[in-house]
Image (cartoon, helix red, strand yellow):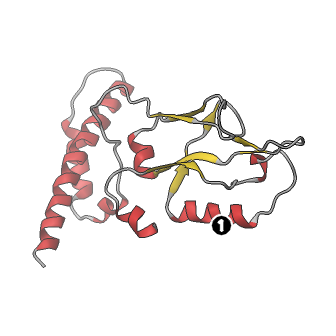
């Protein structure tokens, strides 16, 4: 599974009844052993997944005994790429009427189909000889009137735009070079 998740190109969403809690506060009584939650959390961390916080209720499962146990067993996990692409995603617990589990409503809150990727500065860029000179040239090429904040915003916006294009070209050239070896 780990290899599959790490090699997958599309953002990953995994959801459902995991039949295990992650923390003591996900259960309404003290009958708790941290061995399984520890292992479950280790798998989640190893796969670099994040849980989308649920609203609407604290627990998603209940048994039918007289002294009921409530636990959070149902959840939605996403990879960091999904989290970056859909930062406004929500999970809402719906009413539990038929099952002993709570259905979860998963919504990306994506108002448009056009996706503008978040700008990510790569530390490796600083190792390139020409990088600092290029940033200085782009920064000084923007001449805007206005307040200092407006000038700074225009310069940073232009620099971000330039670096996005530059990074694509650098990445493309690297991939071509790698293929020829």
Residue 48, above or below 114: below
Placement of the N terminus among the 4 image quadrants? bottom left
Residue 113, given in percent of the width and then of the height, sits at: 29, 31
Residue 113, above or below 5: above
Residue drawn at x 87%, y 53% is 30
In the image, is 45 to the left or to the right of 96? left
Residue in the foreground of this view, choosing between 30 and 117: 30
Residue drawn at x 27%, y 32% is 114
Residue in the foreground of this view, choosing between 127 and 98: 98
Placement of the C terminus among the 4 image quadrants? bottom left
Residue drawn at x 65%, y 38% is 99
Q: Which residue is mark 1?
A: 39
Locate residue 43: give its quadrant: bottom right
Residue 153, given in percent of the width and then of the height, sits at: 34, 30
Residue drawn at x 50%, y 59% is 48
Residue 13, above or below 109: below
Q: Secondary structure at mark 1?
A: helix
In the image, is 80 to the left or to the right of 160? right
Residue 54, given in percent of the width and then of the height, sits at: 61, 37
């Amino acid at each position: 599974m780990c290899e599959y998740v790490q090699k997958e190109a599309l953002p990953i969403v995994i959801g459902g009844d995991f039949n295990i809690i992650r923390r003591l506060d996900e259960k309404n009584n003290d009958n708790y052993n941290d061995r399984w939650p520890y292992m479950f959390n280790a798998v989640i961390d190893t796969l670099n997944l994040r849980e989308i916080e649920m609203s609407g209720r604290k627990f998603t499962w209940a048994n039918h005994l007289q002294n009921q146990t409530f636990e959070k067993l149902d959840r939605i996990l996403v990879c960091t790429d999904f989290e970056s692409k859909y930062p406004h995603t929500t999970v809402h617990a719906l009413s539990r009427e038929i099952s002993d589990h709570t259905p979860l409503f998963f919504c990306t809150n994506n108002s448009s189909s056009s996706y503008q990727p978040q700008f990510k500065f790569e530390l490796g860029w600083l190792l390139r000889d020409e990088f600092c000179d290029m940033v200085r040239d782009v920064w000084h090429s923007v001449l805007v009137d206005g307040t200092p904040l407006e000038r700074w915003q225009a310069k940073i916006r232009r620099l971000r735009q330039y670096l996005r294009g530059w990074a694509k070209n650098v990445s493309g050239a690297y991939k071509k070079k790698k293929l020829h070896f």
